[in-house]
Image: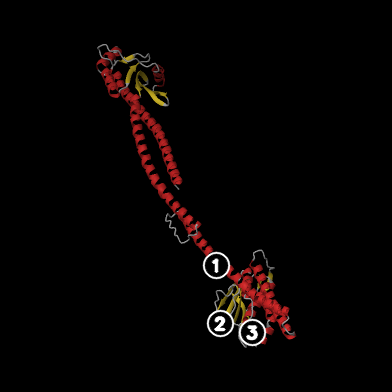
Amino acid sequence: MKKIANRLILQSVSLLLFFALIIAILFGVLFSRHTEELHQEELVHRSELISDTLADYFKTDTSSTSQSHGQNNGQGGYGAFLRFMNQIAGEAVWVVDDDLQPVISDHHQDGTPNTPLPEQAQALVRQTYQNKETNVTKDYQFLQLNELMVVTPILSGQQVLAVVVMHSQVNAIHKNQLSGYVMLLLSLLVSVLLASLLAWRLAKRFVRPIAEMRAYVDNLAHERFETQLKIDTHDELQELGDQLTLLSQRLADAQEARKKKAQSEKDFLSQISHELRTPVMVIKSSLEAMEEGYLNAQEEKDYRHQLLIEVTSLERLVNDLLELSRLESTEFHLQKEPLDLLDCLNDALRSYRIPFKEKQQTLQFTNHLAQKKLMNGDYQRITQMLKIILDNAQKYSPEKAVIQLNLGMSEEDLEIILANPLLDSSLDTQQLFDSFQRGRNPGQNGTGLGLAIAKQVVLRHQGVIEAQTPPGQFVIRIQFPTL
């Protein structure tokens, strides 16, 4: 879990640093370009301002000696203006003619020489005399502006009287930018640090539900299903937690079912042992008595008759066990086909007319179906199941009892209802369909597997079978889906 948290923190911080670097680069490029554009606009504006001012000066100078007069006057007036522009703006300014000769000098009369005009200005001055508009040239080093030169014409109508040359070294701008970059870098570092602390806290908060689920799964692995998992994140983690809770419930149910199955298997083996022991002991004792020769002819005949009864009972028990085992096996397939449930009922009823008659019992069969309804089933198995429930009703009902059998519909399903008088009021209907469960009628013999076999037949046909004990009655209700 610590690895996940560390990975989340590391990836978050790496992502923040990456975006911080991207932001710094983009800001540096955009800020540098914006600053350079502003400086260029300012330089062009000042150059045009000087040009307009000097244009007024040249217009008022109409004497034949205007050139020298301008120079002399410039020494005292416009020369001082140029010096003022140099001092204020920190830029080099020249006013030259088409021969690159100074028209107005900005030096003092103390003999201080003028700053020489840059060589790259020559071509730009000639271009300005030709196109009569402001021209700009830039010199870059390492993708950064190093020098900026602006040449603006001084116009008199369509005639270029002179040009104003302004040359700027952009070092001061870069120094100001550097201080801005330092402030930006410090801001980004502080932001990354704070974001990293927040990412650490969020990562811990994110992995906490995962740690809880890991502990919960560990409890499930050790079959401790009583523990509770509460994830309240309102996201996919909570959905996963809900699925783990559902898994815990199903595992608990499976564990309970496994325990019940194990106990049922133990009880089943115990009951089989008990059911087999009785006929085996009878057969053994009878054979021993016959072997010793202590019996007369009549007694030996009675013993052989009893042996036949016990062997028949044992055979029936073994057959029922095999039948139940086949029905419970998923590899055993029924021979299903469309059939009429009424035909199965009629066959089963014909088989039990004599047993009902012997106990003077009355079977009332009512068919509530308005038309024939078919189902998909195994004819022999369905008939076998009906014989089992009829056999139980006949054996566990008193003499002269009235037994009711109804065939009808329950919504979309075929429904069989068999009702007979209830002799044992303490009958447990929940365990009635388990193996070796018999009613408490001491006068009746049986293996206790009949209803268990009937239940398996119904389940293999996707049906439902249940027993109910309304006052004074025992009712078996069976439903089958129709085609």
Name the residue located 39 percent from the left edge and 21 percent from the top edge. Answer: 132
In what element is the residue under mark 1? helix
Q: Which residue is mark 1?
A: 260
The x and y percentages for residue 99 are 37, 13
Q: Which residue is mark 3?
A: 363
The kind of residue on which mark 3 rests is Leu
Q: Label 1: how many residues lie within 10 Å, few (<14), some (14-19) or many (20+)?
A: few
**3 or 2: tag closer to the N-terminus:** 3
Q: Residue furthest right?
A: 297
CB-based contact (under 8 Å), mark 3 and mark 1: no
Mark-to-mark CA distance, 3 and 1: 38 Å
The kind of residue on which mark 1 rests is Lys
Q: Label 2: how many residues lie within 10 Å, few (<14), some (14-19) or many (20+)?
A: some
In the rendered view, does 281 fall on the left or right side of 424?
right
In the rendered view, does 290 fall on the left or right side of 461?
right
The x and y percentages for residue 11 are 44, 42
Name the residue located 48 percent from the left edge and 61 percent from the top edge. Answer: 225
Q: Which residue is mark 2?
A: 424
Query: From the image, which quarter does the C terminus lie in?
Result: bottom right
Front residue of 426 and 479: 426
**3 or 1: tag closer to the N-terminus:** 1
**1 or 2: tag closer to the N-terminus:** 1
Decide: is 148 above or below 430. Answer: above
In what element is the residue under mark 2? loop
Q: Quadrant of residue 480?
A: bottom right
Can residue 239 be seen here? The reply is: no
CB-based contact (under 8 Å), mark 3 and mark 2: no
Mark-to-mark CA distance, 3 and 2: 20 Å
- Choose mark 3 or mark 1, whichever is in front: 1
Front residue of 328 and 141: 328
